[in-house]
Image (cartoon, rainbow, N blue to C red):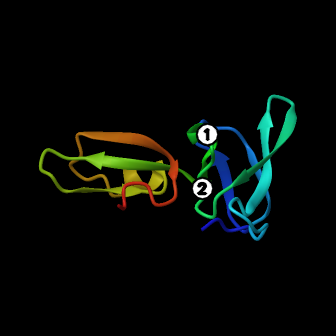
């Protein structure tokens, strides 16, 4: 079921605005899809499915963006640190210190 409090895009990546989820009839979800510089009115099923598969709704989840530092050791132990300073401080016998930039949707890899 589509929720007005959440953000959506179309399956093919276009921006979406949802105006109502109780429009009645066979297509109760009402909104608009951005086509270039214009908005086109559109309706969807309660599930977010559209007459055209490419226009079906996909929830846009918040993104997580972090920079972390990982100490690498010859044996499998290790760990990540919030800063290069911490990685250096607890580095010990490391053979490398790698900066990782994490950019993913919330919940990625948890299913």
Would you name the residue on which mark 2 appears? 59
Q: Report which quarter residue 96 is drawn in.
A: top left
* 60 vs 94, nearest the viewer: 60
Residue extending farthest to the right is 38
Q: In the structure shown, which secondary structural element does the residue marked by tag 1 occupy?
A: loop
Q: Nearer the viewer, residue 46 or 14?
A: 46
Residue found at the far left of this picture: 75
The answer to whether residue 38 is above or below residue 31 is above
**Residue under the image location 36 percent in, 40 percent down:** 98
Residue closer to the observer: 77 or 14: 14
Which quadrant is home to the C terminus? bottom left
Vertical order, 26 against 42 (above or below): below
- Disc 1 residue crowd, few under 14, some 14–19, many 20+, Cα 10 Å: few
- Closer to us: 101 or 75: 101
What is the secondary structure assignment of the residue under circle 2? strand
- What residue is shown at x 18% (from left), y 56% (from top)? 77
Residue occupying the point 76% across, 68% down: 24
In the image, is 30 to the left or to the right of 63? right
Image location of residue 71, percent across then percent down: 30, 48
User: Residue 108's quadrant in the figure?
Assistant: bottom left
Q: Is residue 7 left or right of residue 67?
A: right
38 to 68, vertically: above or below: above
Task: Check disc 1 and report the residue beneath it.
Answer: 52
Whole-percent x, y for residue 78 in the image:
25, 55
Q: Quadrant of the N terminus?
A: bottom right
């Amino acid at each position: 079921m589509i929720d007005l409090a959440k953000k959506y895009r179309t399956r093919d990546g276009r921006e979406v605005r949802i105006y109502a989820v109780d429009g009645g009839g066979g297509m109760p979800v009402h909104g608009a899809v951005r086509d270039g510089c214009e908005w086109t009115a559109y309706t969807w099923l309660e599930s977010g499915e559209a007459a055209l598969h490419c226009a079906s709704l996909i929830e846009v989840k918040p993104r997580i963006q972090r920079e972390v530092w990982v100490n690498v050791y010859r044996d499998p132990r290790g760990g990540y640190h919030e800063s290069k300073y911490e990685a250096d401080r607890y580095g010990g016998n490391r053979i490398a210190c790698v900066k990782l930039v994490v950019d993913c949707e919330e919940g990625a890899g948890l299913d």
